[in-house]
Image (tube, grey):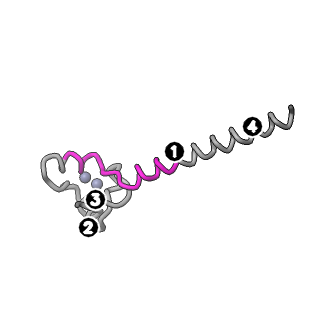
Amino acid sequence: MKIQKALLAVIIGSALAFGFAHAADAKKDAVASKVAGCCVKAAADSKACAHPCCVAAAKEKNNCTKCGGAGAIAAKK
Ligand SMILES: [Zn+2]
Ligand SMILES: [Zn+2]
């Protein structure tokens, strides 16, 4: 019985670890292309954000990390 319980604990433990790993991956993906709030507002007005830091980041095809963005700008289709 003790062995069965231990085995069960290992199975549940690895299942949880698998779930956590997936959750971490999903988080990573979300962070990978986060547009800064100011740039989202500008985009809503069909404008490019006027912040110098955002313009500089956009040139590198990145979201402005200074304004809360992260990662590369998502490619337009
Ligand atoms: Zn901006
Ligand atoms: Zn900025």
Residue under the point 35% across and 51% down: 34
Amino acid type indicated by mark 1 = Ala
Magenta-tinted stretch: 23-41
Q: Residue under circle 2?
A: 59
Residue 25 or 51: which is nearer the viewer?
25
Residue 58 horizontal/vertical position (percent): 26, 63
Q: Residue under circle 1?
A: 23
Q: Is the CB atom of the residue marked by disc 4 within 8 angstroms of ligand 2's nearest atom?
A: no
Contact (Cβ within 8 Å) of mark 4 with mark 2: no
Amino acid type indicated by mark 4 = Ala
Question: Residue 62: which quarter of the image?
Answer: bottom left
Question: Residue 15: which quarter of the image?
Answer: top right
Residue under the point 30% across and 50% down: 36
Q: CA distance from mark 2 to mark 3?
A: 10 Å
Crowding at dot 4, Cα within 10 Å, few <14 / some 14-19 / many 20+, comes out as: few
Residue sitting at the far bottom: 60
Amino acid type indicated by mark 3 = Cys
**Mark 1 or mark 3, which is nearer the start of the sequence?**
1
Q: Secondary structure at mark 2?
A: helix
Foreground label between 1 and 2: 1
